[in-house]
Amino acid sequence: MTSINQDLQDKLRQLNVLEKIIGINVAIFVIGLLLSLIVKTASPLYWLELPKEVGDFIFKPWSIISYGFIHYGLFHLLFNMLVLYYVSRMMLNLFSQKLTLNIYFLGIIMGGLFFLFAYNVLPQNLLKPVGALVGASAGVRALLIFLCAYMPNTEVRVVFFNIKLWHLGVALVVFDVIGLFGMNQGGNIAHLGGVGLGYFYAKQLIKGHDIGKGFEKFMDGIVSFFKSSKKSTLKTVHKRKSNTVAGHTKSEFNEFNKQKQIDIILDKIGKSGYESLTEEEKAFLFKAKD
């Protein structure tokens, strides 16, 4: 039994951060399924759902994030988690875990805010009756659209053929806009919130601005609040400006062809994350994408 527990712990440690989120979503789905059999209700996790009324939301402020972990339909869960798994492969090969989490959770929050705005500000005759909001779709959309906007000309395999990411992004937005006139109007409103966040995040990051830093510090503050504060005995080391590019001298780097230069910088991102790049390396990568 000890060996099985150790193997399970080892496998869990090897999961990336988005795979762990997938595991949490699946676990909550199973809990919700079991609760629905016990209490005989269609919404056994209602305290985690995002209500459409602001008055109800005030008493459930955590639901602006927790709704993103709730799925009541098996196909809803499977679709979101499969897409999230695929996106995790691309995101975490190019960017840090923190940046990826920033986009995902800010996408969920923005999707929730779009949902609340629509059902509390817009004329009700424009809207269809809707219950509470659930599902990770807004966060998944944010990650997808971020990739589509950040590297639009990158090709990905879809079934039997390759398409550019910007084509995929446009198709997703078109489907979401059409969905505003369908039965899942509230869900598609939330999708568009995630779409807007992902697009804006990518365009600002290309300019060198990480708009998720404030959210990241806020979350770090919450985590550190529950940890015992210990003063570090390490001294601050001021780094000198490097004369190298991705581990090569500038003269060596300039001798490589353009594709090799891109591959070297992407390899550095894969090993150390996007934040490890120098301003010069970031600028080169941005120009190379165009």
Image (cartoon, rainbow, N blue to C red):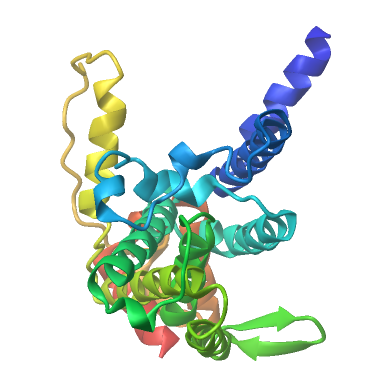
Residue 101 left/right relative to 116: right
Which image quarter: residue 119? bottom left
The foreground one among 175 and 142 is 175
Residue 28 left/right relative to 92: right
The residue sitting at the top extreme is: 2
Q: Quadrant of the N terminus?
A: top right
- Residue depicted at 70% across the width and 28% down the height: 38
Which image quarter: residue 62? top left
Q: Quadrant of the C terminus?
A: bottom left
Residue 34 left/right relative to 90: right
Q: How many marks?
A: 0
Whether residue 265 is visible to the viewer of this picture, yes or no, is no
- Residue depicted at 27% across the width and 39% down the height: 59
212, above or below 255, in the image: above
Which image quarter: residue 83? bottom right
Whether residue 36 is visible to the viewer of this picture, yes or no, is yes
8, above or below 89, in the image: above
Find residue 151 and report its horizontal and vertical position in percent.
47, 80
Residue 186 left/right relative to 234: right
Find residue 9 and report its horizontal and vertical position in percent.
68, 23
Find residue 35 and report its horizontal and vertical position in percent.
66, 31
266, above or below 242, in the image: below
- Residue depicted at 26% across the width and 54% down the height: 54
109, above or below 288, in the image: above
